[in-house]
Amino acid sequence: MMGDKEIPKKEVGNGSKKKKKKRGGSKRRMTSEQTLAYNCVSEWVFLDRSHSPTDDFALPWNQPKEKLGFEFHSHSIHSDGFLSPSKLVERAHQNGVKVLSLTDHDTLSGIPEALEAASRFGIKIIPGVEISTMFTQGRDSASDEPVHILAYYSSCGPAKFDQVDKYLSSIRGGRFLRAENMILKLNKLKLPLKWEQVAKIAGKGVAPGRLHVARAMVEAGHVENLRQAFSRYLYDGGPAYATGSEPLAEEAVQFICETGGVAVLAHPWALKDPIAVVRRLKEVGLHGIEAYRSDGKVADAYDLLKLGGSDFHGRGGKQESEVGSVSLPMLAVHEFLKVARPIWVRAIKEILENYIKYPSETNLQLIMSFGKPKVCRGISPASCPGDFISRCLSLWFTSEERQNSEFEAIKLKLAAISINQ
């Protein structure tokens, strides 16, 4: 980061030479604020490593701390990425990432595989999704532009999973239609492509996006590389660009909030009028924006969380940032969690209360697909679901979050389910 290096001062006076400082000098100690942030974030990151109360977990302010790497924006083959969720997690581990959010376009389908792989590498997964939306400023359709909203959910996923699944499925359906229209436009431009080519690249069951069409164009020899495909034909409003059935950006932000998620505006620097977008979305509940690949002044002006990620796809080349390469300050992650944790706690309570009300195998499997921690795997959720979930509570919540009467009531109800079954 800029500012870490000292600028040498010119010598004045008697001309005596200044002694050179030895490299690798003493490391800067954390401030009390940074230490507090580190301890709070660490407790959450390592919930599956320690069952100690917060005070026991906290590290002395001058003790060496384990380095924590964060990645809040990444993609897998479940949308337009090049790596499987397992390979993505492995790559993130190699790069020192401790917290990874898989944010595939309009789908949560890669999360279970990511969670399974993460348990082998000691990585915390934040279930996420990048939702395709459209922002409009009125009757003039020329001012419309695509806007992507990142949604970050709890360890148990969205509070209303069925609604989220249906919502995302509708958007993915529009992506199929959108890809067909892009192919149609390319054919009219004398750049023949077949649907089968794009579908094969996207993979079975994956809703194709612009990147899949661009890859098909490269394979067909119509362009030299992906960058050329976008700069000539597939850019927003380009000759082969098409829209799908994206919801309005405001509606998406409200939907994320209603389903227990944290809403963050993705890559605002790519928008035509980021101020107009941020102002409107802030009014309906936007929590933050990606700021750690831009200056963050917009976030400050509208009192929004500053987040950031590499937007890693795994395509390779000099143009792409590596997974985990965006350095998020610990204080920024702490601020994010101060907003996110209460939202996620309420979402998990809602999920558990729904299970208590309707203790079906389907609802249990839904909880387990997102929230089955490694240390609970010796217990059978099918034979004793209430006990199983109760054991998991200490791994989903910090000790402070568990210390209230609502959780005690939930545990008693879960125990009753186990007894009845």
Image (spheres, rainbow, N blue to C red):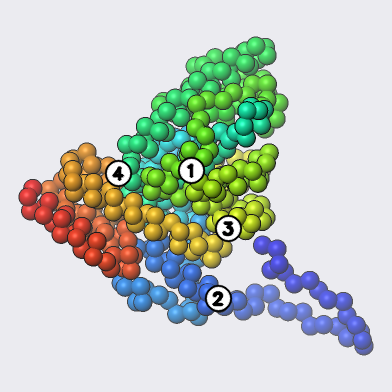
Callout 2, which amino acid? Met
Residue placed furthest toward the front: 139
Inter-mark Cα distance, 3 to 1: 16 Å
Check disc 1 and report the residue beneath it: 253
Residue plotted at (42% across, 33% down): 168
Check disc 2 and report the residue beneath it: 30
Callout 3, which amino acid? Asp
Classify 418 as above or below 162: below
Q: Earlier in the sequence, mark 3 or mark 1?
A: 1
Residue 334 percent coordinates (x, y): 49, 64
Check disc 4 and report the residue beneath it: 369
Confirm whether residue 367 shows in the render: yes
Disc 4 secondary structure class = helix
Inter-mark Cα distance, 2 to 1: 36 Å
The quadrant of the rendering that contains the N terminus is bottom right
Q: Residues within 10 Å of mark 1 (few under 14, many from 20)?
A: many
Residue 284 percent coordinates (x, y): 50, 46
Disc 2 secondary structure class = loop
Q: Earlier in the sequence, mark 4 or mark 3?
A: 3
Callout 1, which amino acid? Val
Inter-mark Cα distance, 3 to 2: 25 Å
Q: Earlier in the sequence, mark 2 or mark 1?
A: 2
Q: Residues within 10 Å of mark 4 (few under 14, many from 20)?
A: some
Q: Earlier in the sequence, mark 3 or mark 2?
A: 2
Q: Residues within 10 Å of mark 2 (few under 14, many from 20)?
A: some
Could you tell me if the residues under marks 3 and 1 are in contact, i.e. CB atoms within 8 Å? no
Disc 1 secondary structure class = helix
Inter-mark Cα distance, 2 to 4: 38 Å
Q: Earlier in the sequence, mark 2 or mark 4?
A: 2
